[in-house]
Image (cartoon, rainbow, N blue to C red):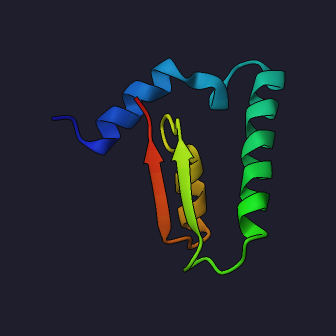
Amino acid sequence: MKNLNEKTQALDTIVPEYESGSKLVKWLFHKRLKWATQQVQKKGNTKIVSVLDAGCGNAIWIKQLSQLEYKKLYGIDF
């Protein structure tokens, strides 16, 4: 079974939009992440808010939220 880093690297080759060479595509994807993060932050306390990222891809949003000290983070992708 592949470890998380191997899976993340594989997904990075499939879903490169977050690091796209197109400035518009890159801007759009990062703008979406910023908006979603702001919506979660409106909910309050980082220790009690639960977040499910359905279709998380390489979990970039989950990683960002964990850096903001959110604890109840879940991601799923098929």
Tell me: residue 67, above or below residue 9: below
**Residue at the spot x=72%, y=57% of the render?**
37
Q: In which quadrant of the rendered view does residue 3 lie?
A: top left
**Residue shown at 77% from the left, 18% from the top:** 22
Q: Quadrant of the N terminus?
A: top left
Q: Position of residue 34 (x, y in %)?
A: 77, 50
Q: Position of residue 5 (x, y in %)?
A: 33, 41
Q: Is residue 12 left or right of residue 21?
A: left
Q: Is residue 56 left or right of residue 24?
A: left
**Is 21 situated above or below 50?**
above
Residue at 47 percent of width and 20 percent of height: 13
Q: Is residue 76 above or below residue 20?
A: below
For the view shown, which residue lies furthest in the left direction? 1
Looking at the rendered image, the quarter that the C terminus falls into is top left
Q: Position of residue 26 (x, y in %)?
A: 75, 29
In screen coordinates, is 3 left or right of 22?
left
